[in-house]
Image (cartoon, rainbow, N blue to C red):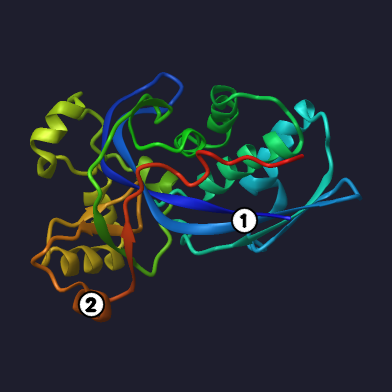
């Protein structure tokens, strides 16, 4: 039985810089890995079937864990059935990349368990078929991202803590992308510019999320009392960077919704994962 963590991420900013002919959006963002984990257990079984426990609200054919396994099956030299259990700590529909992380963890584990022999880039190429955020979890390093999020330049970021609030709502990414007022022409920028003035880098989805979801507006207003609140991904989670001036315990206790204190990660705990098959 294999039990591994599946980490979350924050988008330290998120700009949409254009739109492709196929409808996909070009973006720029920074992916910051954090130590908020789902825990996934993989137990080989003899019946050749993949069973998934812990995500009953997601249909099997739409489950990214199941779809990741199906992508690897043609490469499996030692295929076996699996009981996959997931302990969900990363909220869903939150902009923290939980589903993408679970898919990436599945690709990493099964690549070794089934002796598929694929390298990181090959796994990332499969991962992007499941979601634009999957490759960052395959490589397991913080990155400046462009394209639809799959073109990664790995970067070193200072160790930090963040307070995250999860408003009691589920944001539809498709609904936000469909809004006519969404800014889609942010000026292309650089990591160097971000390092010089990080507070000038926001999230193009934030105005819409605040307008359409009162719970997000409430969380943003609360955190803005203590720092510069930002939306991660398309939401619903919002966060601030912890500074020495703020009272962490008080902020967490008085938050209007579920709150988390997390640490940044230099790399994913799966970076050096190996299994004896």
Q: Secondary structure at mark 1?
A: strand
Label 1 Cα neighbours within 10 Å, binned few <14 / some 14-19 / many ≥20: many
User: How many labels were placed on the picture?
Assistant: 2
Across and down, in percent, residue 171 comes to: 40, 56
Residue positioned 28% across, 45% down in the render: 205
Residue sticking out furthest to the front: 276
**Residue 270 numbered tag:** none
Q: Quadrant of the C terminus?
A: top right
Q: Picture coordinates of residue 222 (x, y %)?
A: 18, 70
Residue 24 position by quadrant: top left
Residue 79 vertical placement versus 212 (above, below) = above
Nearer to us in this view, 167 or 228: 228
Which one is in front, 184 or 243? 243
Observer-nearest of 158 and 169: 158
Disc 2 on helix, strand or loop?
helix
| 131 relative position to 260: left or right | right
Q: Is residue 166 above or below residue 70?
A: below
Tell me whether circle 1 and circle 2 mark residues in contact (CB < 8 Å).
Answer: no
Q: In the rendering, at what x and y percent does residue 61 appear?
A: 71, 46
**Alpha carbon distance from label 1 to label 2:** 30 Å
Q: Residue at coordinates 47% horizontally, 33% vertically from top-left?
A: 139
At horizontal 39% and vertical 31% (from top left) the residue drawn is 149
Crowdedness near tag 2: few (<14), some (14–19) or many (≥20) residues, C-alpha within 10 Å = few
Of the two numbered discs 1 and 2 on the same chain, state the one appearing first in sequence.
1
Query: Image quadrant for the N terminus?
Result: bottom right
Q: Residue at x 75, y 31 (%)?
A: 115
| 255 on left or right of 115 | left
Residue at the spot of label 2: 249
Residue lying furthest right: 47
Q: Residue beneath label 1, please?
A: 40
């Amino acid at each position: 039985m294999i039990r591994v963590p599946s980490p979350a991420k924050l988008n330290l900013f998120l700009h949409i810089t254009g739109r492709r002919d196929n409808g996909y959006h070009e973006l720029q963002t920074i992916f910051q890995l954090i130590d908020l984990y789902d825990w996934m257990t993989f137990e080989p079984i003899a019946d050749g079937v993949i069973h998934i426990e812990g995500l009953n609200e997601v249909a099997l054919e739409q489950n990214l864990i199941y779809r990741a396994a199906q992508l690897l099956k043609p490469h499996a030299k030692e295929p076996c059935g699996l009981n996959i259990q997931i302990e969900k700590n990363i909220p869903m529909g939150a902009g923290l990349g939980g589903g993408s992380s679970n898919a990436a963890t599945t690709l990493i584990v099964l690549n070794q368990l089934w002796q598929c022999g694929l390298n990181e880039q090959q796994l990332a190429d499969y991962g992007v078929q499941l979601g634009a955020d999957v490759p960052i979890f395959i490589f397991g390093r913080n990155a400046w991202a462009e394209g639809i999020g799959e073109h990664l330049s790995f970067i070193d970021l200072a160790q930090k803590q963040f307070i995250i609030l999860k408003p009691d709502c589920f944001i539809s990414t498709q609904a936000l992308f469909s809004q006519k007022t969404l800014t889609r022409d942010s000026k292309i920028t650089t990591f160097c510019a971000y390092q010089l003035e990080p507070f000038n880098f926001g999230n193009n989805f934030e105005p819409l999320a605040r307008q359409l979801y009162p719970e997000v507006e409430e969380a943003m207003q609360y955190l803005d009392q203590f720092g510069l609140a930002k939306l991660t991904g398309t939401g619903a989670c919002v966060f601030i960077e912890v500074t020495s001036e703020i009272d962490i315990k008080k902020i967490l206790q008085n938050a209007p919704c579920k709150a988390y204190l997390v640490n940044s990660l230099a790399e994913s705990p799966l970076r050096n994962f190996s299994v004896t098959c």
